Image: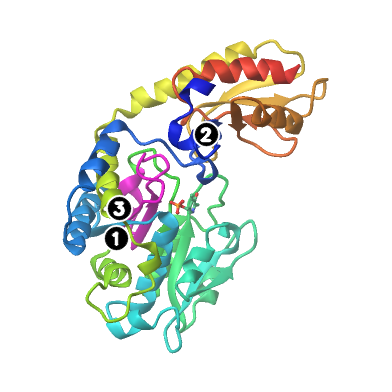
Amino acid sequence: MTQQNWPEVYRKLGVKPVINAQSWVTALGGSLMRPEVLRAMDEAATVFVDMKELNRAAGEVVARACGADMGLVTAGCAAAEVLMAAACMTGVDEMKVERLPNTAGLKNEILLFKGQRNRYDGAFEVSGAQIVEYGAVDSARPYHLEGAITDKTCAVAYVIGPFIKPGLGLEKTIEIAHAHGLPVIVDAAAEIPPRSNLSKFISMGVDMVAFSGGKGLGGPQSAGLLAGRRDLMEAAYLNSLNLDSPKAGIGRPMKVSKENLVGMVAALELYMDSDETVIIEGWMSKANYIARKLAGIKGLRVVIEDTPVDRQGPQPVIYFERSWQGPSPSEIRRRLADGDPSIRVGGGGDGPINLVMVNVQDGEEKIIADRLVEALN
Ligand SMILES: *Cc1c(COP(=O)(O)O)cnc(C)c1O
């Protein structure tokens, strides 16, 4: 982004825009909201409403999109993790809801496969719950999970994400948890797109699932979706919105504004109506453009990869062969980040560099290609 499209609001603060070839990462602002979403938020800001009523109405849109009994717009996927954990501990018992994060006397252990530990799982524990790991780093057996279940267990958590290991797999995890009467709560923050994932995990039988609103869904960065089984969702509502209670619940620091509620609904509806094929073709054409510009450079192998498990959309991946004589990948990454405009790319250390197209705006692929050619020299 050149000097002339440096929005005044950021210019006043001295904060420069960056080109985001790193995906829907929190560190760069999630995603950009479409004009329809921004207009909806603008409109939402002009009047007062009953927030309980608005939350219920927005929740119905989420429930329909996810094929669940009930839904709720949350302050991001991490906030949804707090609420899932809280719901599994308190149920709809208001005395328990008021007590959190003090869990004395409550079933407060959430089981999580060791290989699915991640930088966000502390959100489950914000509720007062404790994570109990099962299995080895790379794999788990059914007896690991079964053996970890005690009379303190309140839920089995499961995390789905790029580079996150499946452990027992979701199906087996559900089977074992349900055989023991335990709910399965899922963090699927970055699993949209594809759209089919909105309802996939619910239809597989999970009890609650959470998604980020500000990643592939294109909603406000600080919004998310939570959907699931009626009794647990009622419990999540209580932990989030017990507006009539003398004591605010654990979800109070994670409230969602009316503007974000409405923006999230608008983004979700737009997303449900979008043509996924066209969107993916757009990413593919940008990926192809960059790959073509980098073709034939000695010591580089540029491949377009799109394995849904560990990549977000089709993207050029630059592999550095032993014959590569130019600057190291980390030096190249530094040059791109330190230049003007700053370009942020995927990968780390001296591994391959991947260029995620999902947040690359039209025309930026040309800037990225030119700057890469420069940085590679
Ligand atoms: C991004 C992410 C989160 C956090 O989501 P927010 O919507 O930013 O709160 C949690 N878990 C995983 C696996 C994520 O990728």
Amino acid of disc 3 = Ser
Q: Does residue 279 lie above or below 190 as drawn?
A: above
Q: Give the extent of the magenta segment.
A: 197-226
Residue that appears at 49% across and 21% down: 4
Residue that appears at 64% across and 36% down: 347
Amino acid of disc 1 = Gly
Residue 7 painted magenta: no
Compared across the picture, whether 59 is left or right of 217 comes to left
Asked whether 112 or 189 is in front, the reply is 189
The spot of residue 195 in percent (x, y) is: 33, 39
Amino acid of disc 2 = Thr
Residue 209 painted magenta: yes
Q: Does residue 62 lie above or below 151 as drawn?
A: above
Compared across the picture, whether 250 is left or right of 114 comes to left
In the rendered picture of this protein, how many numbered marks are placed on residues?
3
Q: Does dot 1 land on a helix, a strand or a loop? A: strand
- Tell me where residue 82 sits by quadrant: bottom left
Residue that appears at 67% across and 15% down: 373
Where is mark 2, residue-wise?
307
The spot of residue 324 in percent (x, y) is: 80, 21
Q: Disc number at residue 203?
A: 3
Q: Does dot 2 land on a helix, a strand or a loop? A: loop
**Does label 2 or label 1 sit earlier along the sequence?**
1
- Tell me where residue 248 sits by quadrant: bottom left
Q: Between tags 2 and 1, which lies in front?
A: 1
Q: Between tags 1 and 3, which lies in front?
A: 1
> In the current view of this chain or complex, which residue is farthest to the front?
12
Q: Does dot 3 land on a helix, a strand or a loop? A: helix
Q: Disc number at residue 228?
A: 1
Compared across the picture, whether 298 is left or right of 366 comes to right
Asked if the residue at label 1 sits under 8 Å from ligand 1, the reply is no
On the question of residue 163 being in view, the answer is: yes
